[in-house]
Image: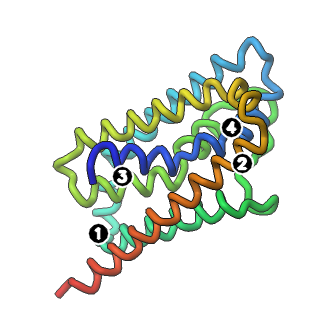
Amino acid sequence: MTLASAALLLFLVMDPLGNVPLFWTVLKKVPPERQQRVVLRELGIALVFLVGFLFAGRYGLELLHLSEPALTTAGGVILLLIALRMIFPSPEHNLHEEVAGEPFVVPLAIPYVAGPSALATELVLMSREPGRWPEWLGAVLLAWLASSAILYFASAMRRFLGERGLIALERLMGMVLVTVAVQMLMTGIRQFLAQP
């Protein structure tokens, strides 16, 4: 996997377009003059968590004695579930959370930006080739920057694309993510079957 493909994968699983309505809903209770500052703060917290997990997450896996095929397959399953939710959303299975007052860490930073799918993807990247950590860090930063730009300008984007445009883009991202998830599943199964 190249730096660009890793960054694109992380961007897809962070799902910033799908998070625009969630951010918008949570921020409705925040005074308009503070909304942009809150978004920047939450995006910064998410970045710290993503970078920290990129380096610390694999040690947790080593403690649990999890193999690479198991991790790759599990990552594929998680991505597939997330992708299917993006394509076929339902009111019972959305990530919307009611927040009283100004949000802090939860739910904007975690899980909307630094969610389980992004963390699982980081684990897969680092467990496969830990020596390429500068590239994986670059991929995290690129995906975070692109997601942050979309979420920072969420209000303008919502006005420009409209609700239907955002929904269409999210469905498209979900379909791309399904193919990535299936590829991860097949890779994990192939690795498992190739073991002695």
Horizontal side of 5 relative to 10 (left or right) equals: left
Return the residue nearer the eye: 172 or 28. 172
Identity, as a three-letter code, of the amino acid under mark 1: Glu
* Disc 1 to disc 4, C-alpha distance: 33 Å
Q: Are marks 1 and 4 in contact (CB under 8 Å)?
A: no
Residue at numbered disc 3: 57
> Where residue 33 sits in the image (x, y, percent)?
75, 11
Query: The residue under label 4 is which amino acid type?
Result: Val
Q: Which mark is residue 20?
A: 4
Q: Which residue is mark 1?
A: 68
Q: Are marks 3 and 4 in contact (CB under 8 Å)?
A: no
Tag 2: amino acid? Ile
Measure the alpha-carbon separation of dots 3 and 4: 28 Å
Specify which label sits upstream in the sequence, 1 or 3: 3
Of labels 2 and 1, earlier in sequence is: 1
- Residue 106 position by quadrant: top right
The 10 Å Cα crowd at callout 2, few under 14, some 14 to 19, many 20 or more, is some
* C-alpha span from label 3 to label 2: 32 Å
1 or 4: mark nearer the eye: 4
SS label for mark 2? helix
Q: Position of residue 109 (x, y in %)?
A: 58, 37
In 3D space, how far apart are the residues under numbered discs 4 and 2 (Cα atoms)?
10 Å
The image quadrant of residue 160 is top right
Q: What is the spatial separation of the Cα atoms under label 2 and label 1, in whole angstroms?
A: 35 Å
Which is more N-terminal, label 2 or label 4? Answer: 4
Quick check: marks 3 and 2 in contact, CB under 8 Å?
Answer: no
Residue 167's disc is: 2
| Residue at (50, 55) in percent of width and height | 117
Residues at marks 1 and 3, CA–CA distance in whole angstroms: 13 Å
Residue 9, given in percent of the width and then of the height, sits at 42, 51
Circle number at residue 23: none
